Amino acid sequence: PQTIYRKDYTPPTYQVETVELGFDLDPDRTIVASRLVMVSNPESVGEGIELHGVNLQLVSLRMNGRTLYEGDYDISGGILRIPAAPDRVTLEIETLTSPVKNTTLSGLYVSNGNFFTQCEAEGFRSITYFPDRPDVMAKFTVMLRADKNRYPVLLSNGNLVEEGDLDDGRHFAKWEDPFKKPSYLFALVAAKLVCQEENFRLKDGRDALLQVWVEDGNLDKTDYAMQSLKNSIRWDEERFGLELDLDRFMIVAVSDFNMGAMENKGLNIFNTKFVLANPRVATDVDYAGIEAVVGHEYFHNWTGNRVTCRDWFQLSLKEGLTVFRDQEFSADMIGTDSGRAVTRIEQVRTLRQAQFPEDAGPMAHPVRPDSFVEINNFYTVTVYEKGAEVVRMYQTLLGRDGFRKGMDLYFERHDEQAVECDDFRAAMADANGRDLAQFERWYSQAGTPVVTASSRYDANAGAFALTLSQSCPATPGQPDKLPFHIPVAVGLLGADGKDIELTVDGKKAGATAVLELTEPSQTFQFTGVKQAPIPSILRDFSAPIVLDYPYTDEQLLHLFSHDSDPVNRWEAGQRLAMERLLAMTAAAGSGGQLALDDTFIDAMRKILVDESLDPAFRENALLLPSESMVAEQMDMVNPQAIHLARQSMRKAIGSTLRKEFHAQYEANQTPGDYSPDAISAGKRGLKNLALAYLSAAPDDAINMLAQGQFDRAGNMTDRVAALVSLIQSAAPGAADALERFYAEFDNEALVVDKWFAIQAAAPGADVAAVRALMKHPAFTLKNPNRARSLIFNFCNGNPAQFHAPDGSGYAFWAEQVKALDALNPQVASRLARSMDRWRRYAPALQAQMKNALEKVAGAGKLSNDVNEVVSKALT
Ligand code: DPP
Ligand code: ZN
C-alpha cells in the first residue's frame, strides 16, 4: 500500500464544468453514462486527463465525439489516463457496475432492496470514471431510470426538473443541482419509501420543501428529525446569518450505513439511528443524537459544501468546524447556562475517553494529517472532536463577535471554493487584526499538550503568581514539539467559595481571565488578592490539554462544592474519583483491601441532594470515570483490577447513600407524556443513575424496584435503564426481562441493536456468550449497526472480559476483523483500532495482543484500511 503525503499536492490538470449522469438502475447490472465537459486547468503543472475509477467495467469512452481505444488511454492503479487531450473536451463514458454485489457500503449499493450511494471520501470513483478529488467542483445534472414498482421514489441532489413514465414499467426523474460541487457530495436514492414533508418559511421569505424519507412503517418516527431540521435552519440564520440556498432539502434514512450520516447537497443520507425516534423505541440519548446529527449535516451545507476542502488532509476544515457548530446548536437549544455546561461536560468526556487515547497511540495524527494510506481511517476523533476544540479556541481567544467576524470573512473570501485549514485561520486572524501564526501548531502537531501549573501566594503583597509550563509528548514521526498558543481560562476562589475579582498583569479581568500561554513557561501575576485563593484552572475546558496542578484533596473538595464554573466543578469531582479509583485498582491488583473514604462519599452526597443544581449536572457529577479512562492513567493496565475497583466503588457509594438515592429516585420521576427536552431528560438521567447505584448493592427490594420500572416504563429511556440494572446486578428476573424485551421489539431493528449491545457489555458476557449471540437469527455482520452493537460493544465496552487472561477475547477480535474485512473494510478497520493501546497492558496480555495483531497483519488479502491500522500498531 502506498502512503499519500500532503506535501505532494498538485492542482488538477483539468477542471470539470458540467457533468451529466444517466443511471439505468438494476441491482445486478447498472449502466452509468457520463458526459463531462472539461477544461484544462491553467494552474496545473501536469498534462493529460486523469480520471479515477475502481471496480468499473468500461463499456465505451469517447472524446469530442470520437471513440477512444486502448492506446489512446491507459488504465492502471485506479487511474484512467488520456495523455493527449485538447484544452476543452467533452468526454462520454459508459460503465457497468453491480450494486447488489457491493458490500462495502461505499459507492452505489443496495440496502433492503433499495439503491443508495455513499461517496465521501472516494466512493464516486466506484460509480463512474471521474476526477474524484474535492478540488474539482462541477455542476451536476442527473437522470435516473428504474422500475417504477420496485423503485417508486427517485432522488438526487438539487431540484427535480422533470419526471415521467418510460416503457416496460420503468420511469425516470431528472435532477439538477444549481451549485458547483465536488463528486463526494453526489448522491442518489432509488427506493420504495414514504416521507413526512412540510413547507418551511426561510428568513428571506422563500418557502423551502423539507422532506424526511423512511421505509413504510416508520412514518411514526420522523417528527423529531423534522423538528430538528427546522431548528437547525433557524439557528444558522440567526447565529451565523447563513440561509438554506435550495428550494428543497431532503433527509433519507437507510439501515445499512457506515457512518452516522452524510451531507450530500440537498439530499442528506442518514443512518436510521440518527433519524428514527418515538418514545417507545428511542432513548433520551438517541433523541439528542438525532438533534446533533441533523444539525451537523445541515450545517455542512455552508461549512463543507459551499466552502469545501482542497484535499482530504484538510478534512478538519469542514468537520472540526461543523462539529463545533453542532455543539453550539445543541447547547443553544437547551438555552440555559447550566444546560450548556452539561453539554460541555459531555464533550470533555468524549474527548478524554476517545481522543486523548488516540493522540497517545500508534494512530496519533495532527488535526491536519501529513500523510495517510487510506483516507477512511482519518475520519477520527482527532479530526472531528479535537478539530472542534481548535475551532472553539478561536472563539475563546476572539470572543463570540470576533469569531462571527472571522466566519463572515471566510465566506466572503471563499464561497464556492475548495480551500485549506490555513485559509480559515487567516480569515479569523485578518477579521480581528490578530496574529495567529503560532496557533497553526494546533493543526500541524499531534499529541495532547500537558500544562503543568504551580503557584505562589504572597500575603503581604496580596499577589498570586501562577506559572504555566507546557510540553507535548512525542508522537509517531514527531519526536519534538514547539510550544502551542493555549488559552487557559482561570478563576480564583476565596475561602467562602466565591470568585475573586481578578486583576491580571495590571488589567481588570472579572471573575474569569483568559491567559494566553505561548511560551514554554510563563508566569501570570494576579494582584489585589487579599487571601490565599484556590485556582480554578482551565475553566470551561478552554483548551484540549491535560492540566497538571498539585491540588490537595481539600482544595478539590472546595472546588467540587463551590466552583462557579460548572465544568471545573465537575472536573474536581472527577479528579477526586480518579485518585481513588487508581488507589483501589492498585489494591485490587495486589489483593489488598478496597476501602473508600467517607469524605469522598460525603462530597458525593452533598451534590446528590443539592436541589439548587440541575438534575443533569448532578447525574454527571456522580458518574465515575469509565474503566477505559482509568486504564489511560496507568502505565501497566490490569483490566480486571480496574473493573473490580470501579465496581466496589459503585457498591460502596450505592449502599452508603441508599436512602438519598431512593429519595432522588422518587423525586425525579417524570409522569405524563414523554418529552425529550433537556429538563425532563436530566431528571430521567438522575433517576436512572440512582437506580444504577442502588443496583450496585442489590437486594430483593432494589431488584423489585428495577423490575417494576421495567414492567411499567412508558418510554425506552426508562425501559433500557431498568433492563441494564437487572442485568448488571444479575437479578433473578434478568433473563426473563431480556426475553420479553426481544419479543416486544423484534420488529424494531434499532431496538434489537440495543438488545445486543446491553448483553455484550454485561459483566458476565465472555467470548462464549458473545459467540452464542452471533448465532442468533437476528445477528448479521453485514449490517454495521448490528456488528457494532454486539462485537464493538464487547471489544471496546467490556474490557474486563475482552482482556480475559486466556487471550480468548483477542482471538475473537482477530477473527472478526478478518471476517468483516472481507465484507466491509471501513467497518473492519474501526474494529481493528480496539488494539491501539496494546503496549500498555500487563506483559502476559501484551504478548497475546501482539500475537493477535500479527495474525491479522499476516492474513492474506487484507484491505488497505485494516493493513494501515494493524501495521501502525505493530510499528
Ligand atoms: N458524513 C460524515 C459527516 O458528516 C462525513 N462528512 O461528518
Ligand atoms: Zn461532518
Image (spheres, rainbow, N blue to C red):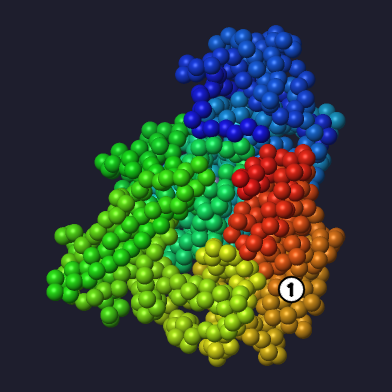
Name the spot of residue 827 as percent of width and height, x first: 69, 48
Name the spot of residue 24 as percent of width and height, x first: 77, 29
Asked if residue 206 lies left or right of residue 714, the reply is left
**Residue 133 visible in image:** yes
Q: Quadrant of the N terminus?
A: top right
Location of residue 670 (image quadrant): bottom right
Q: Which residue occupies the extreme left position in the image?
A: 460
Residue at position x 40%, y 39% from top?
Answer: 424
Location of residue 542 (image quadrant): bottom left
Name the spot of residue 586 as percent of width and height, x first: 56, 75
Give the amino acid at mark 1: Gly
Foreground: 585 or 651?
585
Residue at position x 54%, y 16% from top?
Answer: 46
Label 1 neighbour load within 10 Å: few <14, some 14-19, many 20+ = some
| Secondary element at image label 1 | loop
Where is mark 1, residue-wise? 764
Residue at position x 40%, y 62% from top?
Answer: 547
Name the spot of residue 297 as percent of width and height, x first: 55, 47
The answer as to whether callout 1 falls within 8 Å of ligand 1 is no
